[in-house]
Amino acid sequence: MNCRDFDEIADSYLSNELLVETNHEVIRHIEHCRECRELLAERRELRARLQSAVREADESKIDNAFSLRLRGELRSRVERPARSFARLRFAFASVAVVLLAILGIALFLTIGRKGVEQAAQPSEPADANVIIPPDETRIVPAFLVKVSQDAFDDHINCALSHNLRELPISLEKAARTVDAVNLGFDRSVIQALQEKFGSEVKLVKAHYCVINGRHFTHVVIEEAGRTMSVLLTKRTDADPDAADPMPCGTSGDLTAACFSSGGYAVFVVSNSLESETLLVANTIAGAIVDHIGKVRVAA
Amino acid sequence: MLRMFNGKNDEARWEAFEVEAVPHLQDLYRIARWMVGGREDAEDLVQETMSEAMRSFHNYERGTNCRAWMTKIMYHLNGRRLRKLGRVKIVNDTEEMIAETIAFTPSIPPTLTDSDIISALMRIPDSFRQIVLLADVEEFAYKEIAEMVQIPIGTVMSRLHRGRKLLRMELSDYEQERGKRKAGVLGS
């Protein structure tokens, strides 16, 4: 092998793409040729520098928010068939109800109107206080659905655009003047989130604010460039309990999850996927229930 | 209709996908970013690639290079995207000839910064740059690159050889320009 041959294959040697025999020839050549040895070292260095320059460039770094969103979306594709199956079961149940109704009519015609009138009890009136969202089998109390609109508005006007008519007050002041539940609510939320997701979850602000005439204890958090609101508000005793967090609507690209506990309703609003917002609600639910319980005991 | 994860083995298959494919997300994004340029286009391409990889995961042969398999999907999708946009570039003989006429191998200046290297890389023709990136930055084998880019392995080798030569040339020119500018400033 001469120096010209070496120049032609030096890069392939560095890429480990040569046959074993040719590798041996290269090694034999550079043992005796100082110039080619230096040339090889130089190319090795350029290759390392190029690799490091491209890999370390800002343009090469994936955005964390995009990465999380994509993973969540891919993950949700595995879950979707299960939801379809739930819908399928619902369809089967509907068909069964229709068949029973037909059977009932046949019975009515066979036995006679009187007997059937005695047998058929009037059905329970539909609970006007609940609705069933089309995509979910879970029942979301109407109160939570209604207030979720205020929660979306508060997230948009308070957390994102700072456009409130009334100035918010601190949680300490709200604890003294309105409701003791405000004291330390932000700590309970952030601790639960950081335990699960690490210190990347940051508390942006926490206060007591008003939107559309409804008062919220409002904790704004940030994770991987995304802003999320945790909102607590009072509910009436007449509202049905919904202790387990559930999705409770969307508004534009925002999703909400909600639950209620001990006279309060809690909302999580973010521009994440529904499953991610629900995950956050599930993560903080225990800590919030504990927090409300402690305040009650202290009262 | 697209074939999605379905059936009772979904969960197991997702777990396998999560272990084998998802960890390459950062690498795929880097490859996409240098392939298409802008952040949004790169994110779209990565998203499309991951979705396609998930749908076709049953075709992936365990134990082989999953990163190379997904990069091949990405090149295929990008080719389709470019064809739709009418931006397919045929590497013509002139470019190959320009690269061929580089008669000497300049030495690499010692004072280069990362930014100099990136600038030089961006000045070489795209068809050479892509191969240099795949081989020298991503460390794919020649055979893998040939399958990704759908060109014969001999063409991979020649483009790589010429691409590296062009890069060294650009770096050498850059250093000379800088030397001249410096001399000009000192002399004035």
Image (spheres, coloured by chain):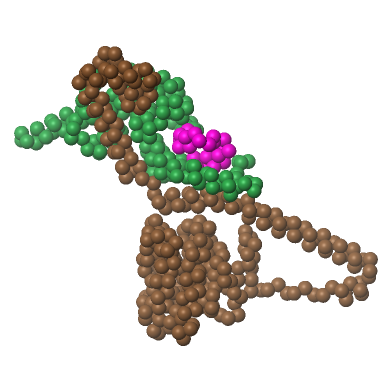
Q: Residue at x 52, y 44 (%)?
A: B17
**B70 vs B39, nearest the viewer:** B70
Q: Inspect this view and state whether residue B34 appears.
A: yes
Q: Residue furthest top?
A: A2
Q: Residue furthest bottom?
A: A299
On whether residue B66 falls in the magenta region, the answer is: yes
Main secondary structure along the magenta-highlighted residues: helix
For chain B, the rendered hue is: green
| Percent of width and height locating residue B28 | 43, 40
| Percent of width and height locating residue A92 | 75, 56
Query: Is residue A153 left or right of B162 when viewed as pictured?
Result: right
Q: Magenta part of the protein: which range?
A: B47-74
The C terminus of chain B sits in image quarter = top left
The N terminus of chain B sits in image quarter = top right
Q: Residue at x 19, y 30 (%)?
A: B109
**A36 vs A241, nearest the viewer:** A36
For chain A, the rendered hue is: brown
| Percent of width and height locating residue A41 | 24, 27
**A24 vs B138, nearest the viewer:** A24
Q: Residue furthest left?
A: B187
A292 to A92, vertically: above or below: below
Q: Residue at x 48, y 75 (%)?
A: A290
